[in-house]
Image: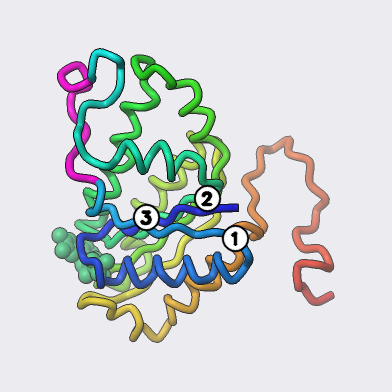
């Protein structure tokens, strides 16, 4: 399987990029494919009023690389991992714009909206956060938003890794070893056990089987 990892910080050598590279390493070590992309290389603008900039054939008229990445890299991938710095207790504008711009392709005016909606669903989704502050809920708003996005798109939120750092790549010095955790997260990204029960979900009463590494 293949995961697209999006580093959504303007700092190419920053903490999001370091976490994203670690997760990509882990995914590749587990025998899957990982493609790491940097938002600033293809995303140059926010969502606009589609009525103003949609072309006559229904396609998006914003002339940057988002359409190609979204259609040819994001949609075909079975997994998506977003790496974002925490900005004002939220995600970076780059990551938000990435999600917002998808609107042009799922709206009914886009000629292949049905195909896009189908391809948007059913992904495994992960999140990598970096922040200066350490308090546990500093990233809670972002985690909640990605969880809701996953629910809305019938996808599976696998989890998140949070590293602390402020200067470039300083997460490497975080004693909680977020780069190691991001690599392990990548290794387990496509195989990790996930659950999101409804009250009538069938379940065995146990979570771990003998093959999950649990001790009896
Ligand atoms: C505009 C801006 C807003 C920020 N807001 C927060 C914040 O609300 N909480 C926090 O802990 N760190 C905040 N930070 C610090 C970054 O989250 C931190 O430096 C992060 O590691 C940067 O990641 P990067 O190297 O991938 O860019 C902010 C930084 C910037 C530039």
Numbered tag placed on residue 171 in the rendering: none
Q: Are marks 2 and 3 in contact (CB under 8 Å)?
A: no
Q: Label 1, on which residue?
A: 32
Q: Label 3, on which residue?
A: 6
Residue 56 picture quarter: top left
Q: Earlier in the sequence, mark 1 or mark 2?
A: 1
Magenta region: which residues? Answer: 43-54
Q: Nearer the viewer, mark 1 or mark 2?
A: 1
Q: Label 2, on which residue?
A: 79
Residue 173 picture quarter: bottom left
| Crowding at mark 1 (Cα within 10 Å: few <14, some 14-19, many 20+) | some
Cα distance in 3D space between marks 2 and 3: 11 Å
Rendered position, 150 above or below 12: above
Name the one closer to the observer, 147 or 93.
93
- Residue at (43, 77) in percent of width and height: 179
Q: Earlier in the sequence, mark 2 or mark 3?
A: 3
| Crowding at mark 2 (Cα within 10 Å: few <14, some 14-19, many 20+) | many
Cα distance in 3D space between marks 3 and 1: 16 Å
Q: Secondary structure at mark 3?
A: strand
């Amino acid at each position: 399987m293949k995961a697209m990892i999006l580093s959504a910080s303007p700092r190419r050598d920053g903490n999001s990029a370091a976490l994203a590279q670690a997760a990509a390493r882990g995914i590749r070590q587990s025998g899957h494919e990982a493609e790491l992309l940097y938002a600033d290389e293809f995303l140059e603008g926010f969502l606009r009023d589609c009525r103003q900039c949609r072309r006559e054939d229904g396609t998006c008229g914003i002339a940057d690389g988002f359409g190609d990445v979204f259609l040819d890299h994001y949609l075909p991938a079975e997994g998506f991992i977003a790496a974002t710095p925490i900005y004002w207790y939220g995600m970076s504008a780059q990551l938000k714009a990435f999600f917002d711009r998808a609107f042009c392709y799922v709206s009914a005016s886009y000629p292949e909206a049905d195909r896009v909606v189908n391809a948007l669903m059913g992904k495994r989704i992960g999140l990598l956060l970096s922040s200066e502050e350490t308090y546990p809920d500093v990233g809670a708003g972002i985690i909640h938003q990605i969880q809701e996005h996953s629910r809305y798109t019938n996808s599976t939120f696998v989890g998140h890794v949070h590293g602390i750092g402020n200067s470039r790549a300083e997460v490497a010095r975080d004693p909680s070893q977020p780069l190691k955790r991001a690599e392990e997260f990548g290794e387990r990204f496509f195989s990790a056990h996930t659950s999101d029960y409804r009250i009538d979900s069938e379940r065995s009463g146990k979570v771990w089987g003998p093959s999950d590494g649990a001790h009896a």
